Image (cartoon, rainbow, N blue to C red):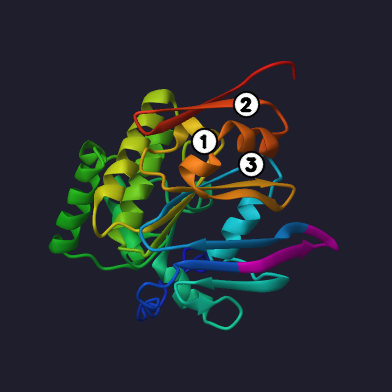
Amino acid sequence: MSDAQRTGPGPPERSARAAQPVEGGPVVAVEDASVVLAGRRVLGPVSLEVRPGEHWAMLGPNGAGKTTLLSLVGAQRQPSSGRVEVLGRRIGRTDVRELRRNIAVVGHSVADRLPSAASALEIVLTGEDSLLAPWWGEFGETQRAAALRQLAELGCKELADQAFGACSQGERQRVLLARALFGRHRLLLLDEPAVGVDLPGREALVCALDAMARSSSGPTTIQVAHTLEELPSSTTHALLMRDGLVVAAGPAEEVLTDASLSACYGIEFRVERRDGRYAAWAVGAW
């Protein structure tokens, strides 16, 4: 089961991973998907295709529909119309509990449901089966050693015995990233991972994402971000949204431009890229 399903008093049953997507096929395929809530269209129609090994950034004003689209891709919601396929499974025609086992989420929606008293190492261990509490699982020394190596790879081995709730915001995000990677998920969704993180914490997170992208076994990623500065240099593609619709989508260098960003936010922007990292600032009168 997924993180969202594991809120009961006892441990969930273990089951097999969801089927692998067709080799060479898309990890995510969204075709003319819309979401209507209380009679109001909040998303769509939207189309998006994410291929294996790609690292997408999703940006746009508050209320643009980013969170709603991410909930479709994360198998947390069904579209009101259109088609959504994730890892070769069509939403609405598959057991989403099994599908979610291959989807990891880093963000407040998961962090807020994990026990603050658990150690960082225990939090990482819960990633194997997407548990929400370490006492729901049984972990041997081999698993603990592997989890410790995962923390070390993200530069936070020293946090292993520290309570998750005592970690800084930036440290918690890196621990959550280690948790996601420990679970060997096929798709990683990063829901505003830099929110509330200070500058050193943000840079540590960006470095961790770049290191993950260099791994041949790393997951395909979609990151919702507030600013260009929080995007790692490994970002391959970008999606800009406004009023529930796609403004631009495609390779990052073609989408993250002065014109596209200005159209997305309704403010004139200048975009600069240095050492693979993007930055943007407003120009002229507001």
**Residue 82 seen in this snapshot:** yes
Looking at the rendered image, the disc whose residue lies closer to the viewer, 3 or 2, is 2
Amino acid found under the numbered disc labelled 3: Gly
Which residue does the numbered mark 1 point to in the structure image? 195
Report x, y in % for residue 92. Answer: 61, 79
- In terms of image quadrants, where is residue 173? top left
The residue to which callout 2 is attached is: 269
Range shown magenta: 31-41
Q: Position of residue 260 (x, y in %)?
A: 62, 38
Q: Is residue 13 left or right of residue 93?
A: left
Classify mark 2: residues with Cα within 10 Å, few (<14), some (14-19) or many (20+): many
Q: Amino acid at mark 2?
A: Phe
**Viewer-proximal residue among 215 and 18:** 215
Secondary structure type for disc 2: strand
Nearer the N terminus, badge 1 or badge 3? Answer: 3
Q: Looking at the picture, how far across and down is residue 150, in whole percent?
A: 22, 50
**80 vs 155, nearest the viewer:** 80
